[in-house]
Amino acid sequence: MKIRFITYLIFAVILTSHILIIGETGPGDSEAYYYSWSKNLQPSYYDHPAGIAILIQIGTLLFGENTFAIRFFSTVLIDLTLLLIFYLSFYISRDNLISLFSMLFLLSMPAFLIGGVSAAPEPALIFFITISAFFFNKYHTEGGEKNLILSSILIGISFNIKYSAIFIVFAYILILYQDRKILFSKIKKPVIIFAIFLLPVIIWNLIHRGATFEYHILQRVNLLYVPLNILKFFSGQLLYFNFITIILLLLIVIKKLRNKER
């Protein structure tokens, strides 16, 4: 009970402090163009799908045209993810202390520290992916088609927030394939549901001559031909994470490979 109390206290302090400060500074460059998207809602844009624009529009409808409104939902969702990580970890480990440390790892990451006070797609992406992972894990351990369907719906929502959610789909497929649970007859409904969530982005890109794919696949990849840009890209991505977490993950992978565990 003490650990649960500490968990809720940390969450309450972080959420309260974030709510108090998010309106104190003006919007950054990316926040400004996400705000402009919210005034012209479309299924997708050249960089991201519509998720962040929708959240900003709801925020400004509720709280007015100000920075607090722009950042409100991103802030609340990334903070709620702290609790989600705690409960997901507890579901897997049944240990309150392990669950608390899992939550603290997320709290210590630059991705959380920056994303917690700015309007960006990542907070909502992390929020919905975490819930999706919970239901996927439940399906993987307990079965039940409804768990896989719920996970599919949540990953579809995640994809409409940021395209990188597609990588989680690949991870799910690998896990199901290794455990011989990928029979199409069992996953037909989740696949159809996820495909429906893909349609808005696909249709928008067909209308706009593949603007999203041109930007992410051609323009960004072309930048990587310059050696300095490659270094800048990878170092920039690594700065989102806690290096202790990266080292621990590598050690776990090495240990499992040595034990011939998949």
Image (cartoon, grey):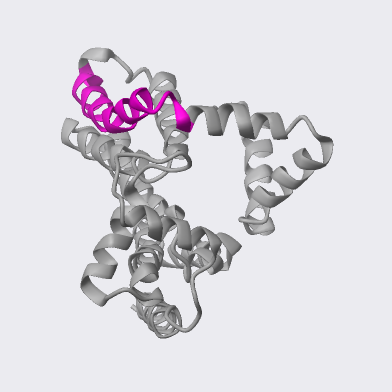
Residue 192 location, quadrant: top left
**How many numbered marks have been drawn onto this rendered protein structure?**
0
Type of secondary structure dominating the magenta stretch: helix
Q: Residue at x 36, y 17 (%)?
A: 180
Seen in the image, is 112 located left or right of residue 176?
right
Considering the image in quadrants, where does the C terminus appear? top right
| x and y, in percent, of residue 188 in the image | 22, 19
Please state which of residues 253 and 113 is positioned toward the viewer in this rendering. 113
| x and y, in percent, of residue 62 in the image | 21, 72
Is 135 in the magenta? no
Please state which of residues 200 and 129 is positioned toward the viewer in this rendering. 200
Vertical relation: 189 (above or below) 243: above
| x and y, in percent, of residue 53 in the image | 34, 54
Vertical relation: 29 (above or below) 211: below
Vertical relation: 122 (above or below) 215: below
Q: Residue at x 53, y 27 (%)?
A: 214
Q: Is residue 91 visible?
A: no
Please state which of residues 32 and 149 is positioned toward the viewer in this rendering. 32
* Boundaries of the magenta span: 186-212
